[in-house]
Image (tube, rainbow, N blue to C red):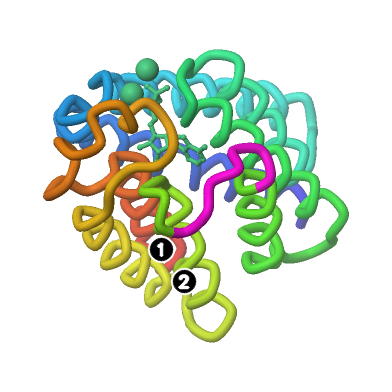
Amino acid sequence: ESRRLAESVLSGLRVVRKALHEAEAELGEIDAVAGDGDHGRGMVRGIDAAVAGAETACEAGAGAGDCLAAAGDEWAARAGGTSGVLWGAGLRAAGEVIGAESGTIDAFAAVTAFADRIISLGGAEPGDKTLVDALVPFRERLAAGSWSSAAETAEQAARRTADLVPRKGRARPLAERSVGTPDPGAVSLALIARAIGEFSRG
Ligand code: ADP
Ligand code: MG
Ligand code: MG
């Protein structure tokens, strides 16, 4: 049973890897509008390292939570960029919550740990035009609804960041140029949420 859970974490990470590889160019283009254009590359480097880290941990017999925490550590170490540090730390926090459980994964608890860690580490608030603008509505919707409906909420929220002026991160110096384009980190978060939703529906 615990092997099955660890294997499903690994499968989920591979699904995210495929989605990020497909979106790499688009994420880079969005980030190039007011940022430095490396968001697609960074997310791909991060997920590639995360899958490798989770594979190593899983093969060594680690449980689901430890596999996810290992994925986070590798993501943080290899992705580079602000998003890499945040995604890595967030996945480790989610893994630590899952690690303490038995049988099934409490998705809301895992997402809450992920969000809390990213918010405390990055210091961004809703409206700053970061991935937090997709993550907070995602978590809120997940508290009351299905993963798929929460992923839809995240996509809408990510699209709405186009109206915002960035107050955090590398896009700030060229803030005005960013208006009309969504935040790359919010877009990638939403697409990851969707990929996981499609995977878990089977
Ligand atoms: P970098 O900006 O270092 O080149 P990326 O391009 O990979 O890194 O990631 C940029 C994304 O990181 C932004 O679109 C935003 O969503 C997110 N981000 C930047 N700063 C913060 C922060 N303080 N808190 C949360 N997310 C942030
Ligand atoms: Mg960038
Ligand atoms: Mg960069």
**Image position, residue 166 (x, y; %):** 33, 43
CB atoms at circles 1 and 2 under 8 Å apart? yes
- Residue 197 is marked as 1
Q: Is residue 149 rendered to the left or right of residue 29?
A: right
- Residue 174 is marked as none
In the figure, 154 relative to 171: above or below? below
Residue type (three-letter) at the residue carrying disc 1: Gly
Whether residue 64 appears in this view of the structure is no
**Image position, residue 138 (x, y; %):** 46, 67
**Which mark is first along the chain, 2 or 1?**
2
Q: CA distance from mark 1 to mark 2?
A: 6 Å
Q: Quadrant of the N terminus?
A: bottom right
In the figure, 58 relative to 189: above or below? above
Q: Residue at x 67, y 25 (%)?
A: 73
Q: Quadrant of ligand 2?
A: top left
Most extreme residue toward the bottom, as rendered?
144
In the figure, 32 relative to 120: above or below? above
Residue type (three-letter) at the residue carrying disc 2: Trp
Tally the numbered discs. 2
Image quarter for residue 144? Answer: bottom right
Circle 2 crowding by C-alpha within 10 Å: few under 14, some 14–19, many from 20: many
Circle 1 crowding by C-alpha within 10 Å: few under 14, some 14–19, many from 20: some
Q: Which residues are magenta?
A: 120-126
Q: Which residue is mark 2?
A: 147
Whether residue 23 appears in this view of the structure is yes
Q: What kind of element bears circle 1? A: helix
Q: Residue at x 48, y 52 (%)?
A: 132
Q: Is residue 55 rendered to the left or right of residue 142?
A: right
**Image position, residue 165 (x, y; %):** 28, 47
Q: Nearer the viewer, residue 155 or 172?
A: 172
Q: Residue at x 36, y 48 (%)?
A: 129
Is 125 colored magenta in this rendering?
yes
